[in-house]
Amino acid sequence: MMKILLSVLLFASTSAWAADSSAPKLDIGKGGQCVEDTQWMRKNHMHLLKHQRDETLRKGIRDEKVSLKNCIECHASTKDDSVIARDDSFCVGCHRYEAVKVDCFECHSGTRKSAWLQQRNAK
Amino acid sequence: MSEIDTQRRNFLKTSVGAAAVAIAPGIMLFDIAHGKPEGASSKVRWGMLIDTAQCKTGCNECVTACNKENGLSGGTAATDSQWIRKIEIKDISNGRELSLPMMCQHCEHPPCVDVCPTNASMKRADGIVLVDKHRCIGCRYCMMACPYKARSFVHEPLHDQNPDVPRGKGTVESCTLCVHRVDEGRQPACVESCPNKAILFGDLNDANSEIAVKVRAVASVQIRADLHLNPGVRYQGI
Amino acid sequence: MSYTSPYELKSPLYYLLIALALLVLCGGLLAVHEMESQGHIITGMNNQVVWGMPHVFAIFLIVAASGVLNVSSIGSVFNKPDYKARSPLAGLLSIAMLGGGLMVLMLDLGRPDRIIVAATNYNPTSVFAWNIVLYSGMFATVFVYLWTMMERRMYPWSKAAGLAVFVWRFVLTTGTGLIFAFLVARQAYASAILPPMFIILSFAWGFAVFYLAQSAIYAWNGKTLEAHVQKRMSRLMGVFVIGALYLVATYHLTNLYFARQTAFEHFILLDGGVYPQLFWLGYIVIGNLLPLLLIFHPSLGKTKSVVGASLAIILGAFALLYVFIIGGQAFPLDIFPGFETSSAFGDGVIASYRPSVFEVLLGLGSLAAAFLITAIGIRVLNFVPREVPQKVEHH
């Protein structure tokens, strides 16, 4: 029930958003499209992520194309390598605008893996 | 039933894959480097054989490597996470002393999985026991149930986690057998780091693997074998 | 049935207590907020003692919630009119304590925000998961039972509902005992005697809580309990205390008989510092000897001394649970039987645990919640025990 309600709300807000000029300006990092088009992703990325997390963790199916790590690899800012560090970061910018709490990054790193490894090895 | 079907399908897939190894090693290597889309297979049972004769008192390399790999602080307060620890043991009857690493034993019948109310504690098809932190509510019943004290609870908010190893406040965690490395065809960090090669990692189900051959050849024990949990980690020389 | 005197809770003490309980509840919620934002680091709990003070409060409340229904069962199932008159109050107390106990269990979770996960992913082998069903079922059965007692048209169903409650609470306390009984890892637990032990403990603790609540209500209304009812209830309470003591003794004596358990018993009964002290002084002296004296001594046994006995039983309950839950975890795991062990992760040493103020606030908050539900319940609905009229004729 909650899910349906949330989806309806999200749908309503995203469709309104398509034409909204006050939409947040995001730092999309390298950007590009590898899964679906932007509008589809805005609406459905959470379902992909939620499905994929169970596949990966519980069954060991690591489909790179839809892995959170891979999303971050392209969408992290080219300036600070993060999708959450600033107000206009790829994930944060939008989620703030929509007032939807994003729970992923309490556990997951919001930093591009290549950059994170570089930092760690420099230590 | 559907699970068996899936397993059968996976088996067929892997057989085809095995044939591919012979024909096109290049293609196979590409698959490994990009993770395994077919997932964990129940044909495999990942395990370890630890040779206590090679494990030195005072050596902490495996612990340090684990901490670095998984982004643990390395602190040893009662509230700090420790996925692997060195235990010094001394036989009370004759004073014989040993040093060995202790971590999640990746049981075939894990008590943590039995007691978890939300199925967050789970065992992968290939025998790796994990905590699904998406589901963990932090009740800590698994920590009460584990006979090896293998689990830690994250007592504080965490920042800057390893992108390969998500961890977070309020959930329980333990050794993952470096599942992110194993799925890439690599060895767990502790295994790689041991200067004396005291830890042997591999597929216990593959009769020709180094670990299976050695388990057949030398005497080894499971810790708390009396509980019949059939751990995937075995010890030699206790 | 004619209502003789209207039960108005006019006493200023009543309102003072309500205000105080609200304050304590707020303290509990504040503690939850802090634990949520800073993590369990601000509690005394750690990787060895994973359940602490909140669980002592929770298990007391849940066990007592089941035991208090004994009063209902004696009335409905065994047809004793004195107790039947008290069934509604017992039902209310049960719901209140179960609510308080579940509140503290839930709020102590590492991720209480995900409690919905517990409902959407169900592991049938988990005793915790069974308990989720048992707790919700208990609420439901007690609600139905109260309904059959308070709604005239439902009276004929009252006996059946009472029987359902009777069965359900046995299963529920068995479930509480099984949380520990099925743990092979720790020496304090893994014993089949725990479920029956918890059931008998629940009789004593539930009865003590009931007696206290009843005495308070009577005092606020300027009433006194009829002598024969008072005597019967206090004697029964004494019998329950003795029964519970017998099972606790059996638990320790069986452990003492098994060589592999003697080190643990040595720790918990003799040289474990605070734990043996709490066991002997808290549970044995205050929780058993004192109440038995207050109840059975020929010159005592009146309402005041039985109120004292009830309080002592409850204090003893907390002492016993602290020893059982926290002392049981503080003793190191026997990972290598026959070996001395040491490590940086507390292997082979007694774990230290000091409850933090936040844990205590959370626990007290749950008591306050249970008190508020009861106090408001008796104010708005007809829960107050009324002696059955024909009882007087018999007298």
Image (tube, coloured by chain):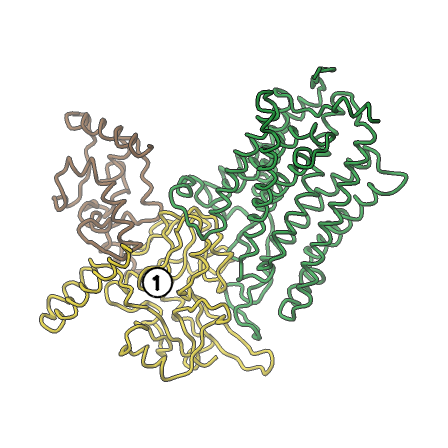
Chain colours: A brown, B yellow, C green
Which residue does the image show at 70% across and 38% down from the upper left?
Answer: C207
> Left or right: where does residue C258 sit relative to residue C55?
right
Which residue does the image show at 29% across and 79% down from the upper left?
Answer: B210
Inspect the image, locate mark 1, and give the three-letter code of the amino acid beneath it: Ile
Which residue does the image show at 19% across and 39% down from the upper left?
Answer: A27
Q: Quadrant of residue B54?
A: bottom left
- Give the x, y percent position of residue C361: 59, 38
Chain label for disc 1: B
Residue at the farthest right position = C299
Residue carrying label 1: B128
Residue at the farthest left position = B23
- SS of the residue under disc 1: loop
Label 1 crowd bin: few (<14), some (14–19), many (20+), radius 10 Å:
many
Residue A77 position (above or below residue C86): below
- Give the x, y percent position of residue B191: 34, 71
The residue lying toward the viewer, choosing from B188 and B63, is B188
The residue lying toward the viewer, choosing from C59 and A68, is C59
- Give the x, y percent position of residue C172: 56, 44
> Left or right: where does residue A111 sit relative to residue C352?
left
- Give the x, y percent position of residue C80: 72, 33
Which residue does the image show at 69% across and 30% down from the upper left?
Answer: C84
